[in-house]
Amino acid sequence: MPSLSKRLGRVKPSSTMAMNAKVLEMQRQGVKVIGFAAGEPDFPTWWHVCESAHDSIRRGEFRYTAVGGTPELKQAIRTKLERDNGLVYSDAEVIASCGGKHSLYNAMQAILDEGDEVVIPGPYWVSYPDMAALSGGVAKIVPASEQNGFLLRPEELRAALTERTKLVILNSPSNPTGATYSEAQIAALGKVLAEHSCWVIVDDVYEFIRYDGVKPKHLVAMEPSLRERAIICNSVSKTYAMTGWRIGYTAGPAALVKAMTTLQSQSTSNPTSIAQAAAATALSGRQDEIEPMVAEFMKRRDYICDRVDAIPGLHVSKPGGAFYVFINGSGVFEKTKVSDGDGLALKLLEGARVGVVGGNDFGSKEHFRISYATSMENIELGMNNLENYLKGL
Ligand SMILES: Cc1ncc(COP(=O)(O)O)c(C=O)c1O
């Protein structure tokens, strides 16, 4: 066989997806395993959103659309940005892509050159460093300490930025830690970023899944000087339980959006026409189904944190958002005969029949991640399994 690309040799497959695939395979073989790996809401997409997809089919919208999204979806994205974030963008400054992951990937492709440094607070979403690497970038991980709730302090950000920094990635609420910045904390990071000239990706995919009942002002609204180099990436996946529809979007300077559109025109073309219609409805229509979903997530978070607290050797700080708990498992490494979070995740899969994701690829070898985007019944069963297994050793 001729050789594969060297570029792809720099990246590894997503570990969250790999664990999820393992869980699904075991379940397919009839093994009763509780899946805590998948990062997607277990709620159905809202019915009126599904209806709008049916309508799109009835209208016969089966053709290519504009590469960067239909006029209706672009308008819905702009409506959302103004309504939720107080930000006014034009059509030329927004682009729809095939999921938030695609938005982030295309944005990095559009701005990074070989050797460019990308500052990523850790623990971080598994895909950031690999996406950066695929664009020639070099990830510079800046650890945010567990003692500080995994929140990066402004002075830590300042110390990490150099003239080599091309991009900083911020994600609040965070995957995997659930760390959620307050408005004051965002403003403080904004002040530091204003002193530098790098790009800033603001990954807002979990913006509505936060438990403090607060909707903080957006970084770009508080620090308008960042607007010409801020790249807001978001998607309908988490807020509207639409992971499978694959619609993400980006707002940023027109030149960046133009570059991303060119890249898209030579790779994927437009995102699926029918999914675009559904996403437009989700973004611009009524928003009343978000709150009950978040309330349910909060119940699950509280339940899991209480259960984890009762298991000797495990430690968790209650996350402020997203639907993950990032558990420090180093206190059970010895008795489970493992040396890191990935090892523990495998032990828990074999011994407790729960599929969690080890922390290694999130930037912490002491932790593992549980996604509570699954039913309360599953959570109870999974936590029973976990507790019985660890206490029985
Ligand atoms: C932090 C973060 N950003 C972006 C995404 C991308 O989501 P999607 O591609 O489904 O829109 C995810 C998905 O897990 C995520 O956790």
Image (cartoon, rainbow, N blue to C red):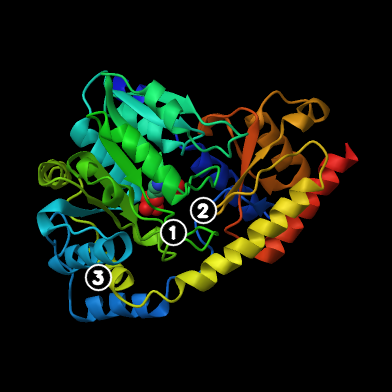
Circle 1 or circle 3, nearest the eye: 1
Q: Splitting the image into 4 quarters, where does residue 215 fall?
A: bottom left
- SS at mark 2? loop
Q: Which amino acid lies under the numbered mark 1 shown in the image of this protein?
A: Lys
Determine if the C-beta at disc 1 is less than 8 A from ligand 1.
yes
Determine if the C-beta at disc 2 is less than 8 A from ligand 1.
yes
On the rendered image, what quadrant is the C terminus found in? top right
Q: Which amino acid lies under the numbered mark 2 shown in the image of this protein?
A: Ala
Q: In this picture, is 236 found above or below 200? A: below
Query: How far apart in space, not on screen, are marks 3 and 2 (Cα)?
Result: 26 Å
Q: Which residue is mark 2?
A: 322
Circle 3 or circle 2, nearest the eye: 2
The answer to whether any part of residue 5 appears in the image is no
Of the numbered discs 1 and 3, the one sitting upstream in the chain is 1
Q: Which residue is mark 3?
A: 277
- SS at mark 3? helix
